[in-house]
Amino acid sequence: MDSIVQDLMKQVATGDNLAAISQSVGGDSTAVQSALGMAMPLIMSSMADTASKPGGMDTLMGMVSQLGGANPAENVNGFLGSPQAAGGAGMVSALLGSQMGGIQNAIAQKTGLPPAIVGQILDIAVPVVVGQVGKMFAGSGMDKNALSGLLGDQSAAAMESAPEIAAIAQQVMSGQTPSAGGVMGILKKFLK
């Protein structure tokens, strides 16, 4: 099975697309690429966690429908020209919730980018990942349970292939309660 995160990194974090994101957020392209490489597995894990909860798939499908006809996964260049139109900030808040600040700060420390720029990168990355998952769901004929399983598998694969995420998880988790859910719940399971 192809990795959603790896496929998206090839599309978004290279060449002209990486240059466009770097210019849009005002960050060094190497640091922006690194931030994307850390953010995308976290986003995938958060989506998997959301999908596993009652009503979670409806929440994710609502995000997909929010993208409307302007799915970033189908037109990355067009999306990068106006990323605000996809509502990335709202999606980031819905997916990462109270852990957003910790994740933002941890990625900022690892990359040297200011947290505000990391926030802008998350605003771009979340709609791209949501759009790719929506595109896969629409084109596959799978039901919501199968998609939830796929997200879980993709999340585990993304975590295994990104050891720097474990360090971010430990850093962010130090400020979380043991019962914290969301991304940190997934990462705690992975780190056991």
Image (cartoon, rainbow, N blue to C red):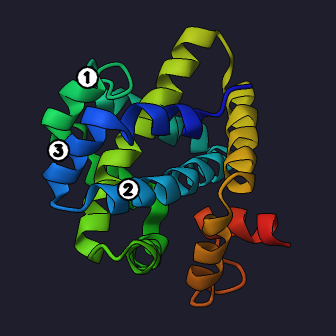
Query: Which amino acid is tagged 1?
Result: Ala
Residue 136 visible? The answer is yes
In this rendering, would 105 be left or right of 21?
A: right
Q: Quadrant of residue 182?
A: bottom right
Closest to the observer, 19 or 172: 19
Q: CA distance from mark 2 to mark 3?
A: 12 Å
Query: Which amino acid is tagged 3?
Result: Gln
In this rendering, would 32 be left or right of 60?
A: left
How crowded pointer 3 is (Cα within 10 Å; few <14, some 14-19, many 20+) is rated as: some
In this rendering, would 125 be left or right of 83?
A: right
Residue at the spot of label 1: 70
- Determine whether 59 is above or below 181 in the image: above
Q: Say which residue appears at 15% left-offset and 60% top-offset.
A: 26
Q: Secondary structure at mark 3?
A: helix
- Determine whether 98 is above or below 26 in the image: below
Q: Say which residue appears at 32% left-offset and 29% top-offset.
A: 72
Q: Secondary structure at mark 1?
A: loop
Which of the image's four quarters has the N terminus? top right
Numbered mark located on residue 92 in the image: 2
How crowded pointer 1 is (Cα within 10 Å; few <14, some 14-19, many 20+) is rated as: some
Closest to the observer, 16 or 2: 16
Where residue 145 sits in the image (x, y, percent)? 73, 29
Which of the image's four quarters has the C terminus? bottom right
Q: Quadrant of residue 111?
A: bottom left
The residue at the far right in this view is 192
Where residue 137 sits in the image (x, y, percent)? 57, 20
Numbered mark located on residue 84 in the image: 3
Numbered mark located on residue 62 in the image: none
Residue 62 visible? The answer is no
Labels 1 and 2: the sequence-earlier one: 1
Labels 2 and 3: the sequence-earlier one: 3
